[in-house]
Amino acid sequence: MPTPPNLLFIMSDDHASHAISAYGSAINQTPQIDRIASGGARFDNCFCTNSICAPSRATILTGLYSHNNGVKTLHDHLDGRQQTYPQLLRAAGYQTAIVGKWHLGHGGVNDPTGFDYWCILPGHGVYDDPNMFEQGVDTHFTGHVSDVITERSLTWLRARDKSRPFALMVHHKAPHRPWIPAERHQHLYDDCDVPTPPTFDDDYSFRSEAAKRAKMRIDRDLNFTDLKADPPPGLSPGEEKHWKYQRYIKDYLRCVAGIEDSVGALLDELDAEGIAADTIVIYTSDQGFFLGDHGWYDKRFMYEESLRMPFVMRYPREIPAGSVVTPIVLNNDFMATFLDYAGLTAPEPTQGRSFRAVARGETPDGWRDALYYRYWMHLADHNVAAHYGVRTERYKLIYYYGRALGTTGSIEEPTPPEWELFDLRNDPMELHSVHDDPAYAPVVKELTERLVELKAAAGDEE
Ligand code: CA
């Protein structure tokens, strides 16, 4: 029986696909991440099921939607007695490790399970000289967090038992808020103006009150910690918004540059060891992010920039180099997929489906043509109303149901329920909801029924 492939799973935090050059970024170049895409596949329709840090991570580990793994919000911790893919890979003979962001609690049943080695940041961790829990022991490290995570990962990789396959999760904190880059990157982009996105001056007309209510606006909601300086006096409102955007996006991209160095070092290590052909390499992020799109930073909404995950994957023995994969895959599919490559079938209650064949360029019979999404944290933090919805290839229907529904961190204050429908073919930037347009009444009816079906099929009864 052939040895199953190694798995190098690199995930960053809040890195949107439109800040990756393999996805056509207009604002930066990412040659190291692009190495993975050009040597394998770029997934153009990979989506998260709940666009926020901890819930996405819990879904990836368990293959379950948030309501089924208990991590619906940032404040929920993962009960490690649940089945996760590292446990199953380890039981099948893999050496397993996680280095970096965990964000699912720690201590007791919240410690990572299924890992031979773990070294995790507490919560979000810090950018400079982080403390990390190394096998449960609070340990101080010196340097920028992205470099520390890389160094710990390489050290573990070099010291492993080379007669057995490995599964290494390198989970970066960057480029999460407050966007503090390594010293060597602090002057990148000093001599240029980063272009603004087409929807930078969105005024939220023709959309929900939920969009208007959100507090994640570049011009209004970024604070001194984010910007690291006060705006110069005498700027017009438009000039000040532009100044804030430059401060924000440049630090974000400088943090991405740190991730680039990490990806490059890890890929070089595989090459140096001669194991690149036998190693599945993935680069993704726990969700997308608004990079000035709609005048925003942050995520949470089911809108495209936040819903979409970058996902590039290289496995030369099976995935044609330079391919583009378009079927819809979800973060709750990762577990079944990783297990499939290891020769294992994802056991119950895993909800996702292996996309191994999809990665080869096939579309299996009955592959999904729609996804179910839910964001639970009603009016928490950035004042985004809780919502659920369905996205197909062409349409997106969103229902802001307007209530907290018992989640920790939500605000009890109800908001009037409202709907949005976007025709992504005619309105890819989602600027004009057509929910109340009579011409779309048949689409509304069909998608509303579809949403009810998908919600029930996902086992979401709240
Ligand atoms: Ca995140």
Image (tube, grey):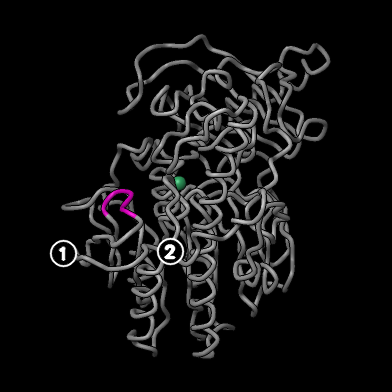
| Residue 165, magenta (yes or no) | no
Q: Which three-letter amino acid code belongs to the residue tagged 2?
A: Glu
Q: Residue at x 63, y 31 (%)?
A: 239
Q: Residue furthest front?
A: 234
Q: Residue at x 73, y 64 (%)?
A: 361
Tell me the quarter of the picture where residue 363 sits: bottom right
Q: CA distance from mark 1 to mark 2?
A: 28 Å
Stretch of the chain drawn in magenta: 122-126
Q: Which three-letter amino acid code belongs to the residue tagged 1?
A: Val
Number of dots carrying numbers:
2
| Residue 270 location (% of width, % of height) | 51, 83
| Residue 153 location (% of width, % of height) | 37, 74
Question: Which numbered dot is residue 137?
Answer: 1
Q: Earlier in the sequence, mark 1 or mark 2?
A: 1
Q: Is residue 59 above or below residue 117?
A: above
Q: Pointers 1 and 2 in contact (CB under 8 A)?
A: no
| Residue 175 location (% of width, % of height) | 47, 53
